[in-house]
Image: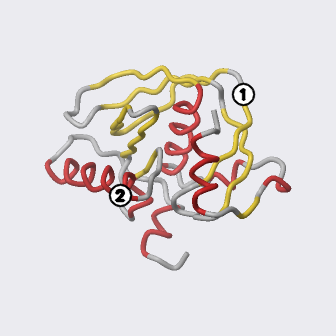
Amino acid sequence: MDSPKAGALRRKARAVGRVTPQIQQLIDGMIDAMHEASGVGLAAPQVGVSKRVIITEVEERLQVLVDPKIVKREGEEIGTEGCLSMPGIVADVPRAARVIVKAKNRKGKGFTLDADGLLARVLQHEVDHLDGVLFLDRVVDTSTIREVTASAEVEAAVTAA
């Protein structure tokens, strides 16, 4: 992890505030990168930008969240997670079963998202990236950390819910 983005992955990302044309460009680039990697979520620090922007695409529903904040967590589930920043590694990670997230959309308008299942897991994983936390930091049972092929990793992420 000696790439420029490695430093951004361990720092707390800065708030965006106003959604500018530069942020719009960042969002478009992130969507392209996520699709290219067949991911279900991506945070700006993963592309080397220390800004509080995440995108998710679960069940073909694309969500853009600017300055997201998890305001409520309920329950707990353990699921298998992988990360585009750490290809070839998956592990079982405990997460809240349901979350409520407040954020702004790509036009800067505030909204609240109530999520459960895979979307709740992806949102928590990506918000962690904004705080410099990686999914391996959340693993309770280290024996669940394992290497996988790229196709198995995508499969694990999709079946996590």
Numbered disc 1: secondary structure: loop
Numbered disc 2: secondary structure: helix
Rendered image coloring scheme: secondary structure
Task: State the image quarter where residue 160 is shown.
Answer: top right
Q: Is residue 74 above or below residue 160?
A: above
| Residue 52 on image: x %, y % | 38, 47
Q: Which residue is mark 1?
A: 76
Q: Which residue is mark 2?
A: 33
Q: Which part of the image, by quadrant, shows the N terminus?
A: bottom right
Left or right of 129, for residue 22: left
Which mark is drawn over residue 130?
A: none
- 159 and 70: which is toward the camera: 159
**Circle 1: residue type:** Glu
Task: State the image quarter where residue 47 is shown.
Answer: bottom left
**Circle 2: residue type:** Ala
| Residue 150 on image: x %, y % | 58, 62
Nearest to N terminus: mark 1 or mark 2: 2
Pick out the residue farthest to the left: 21
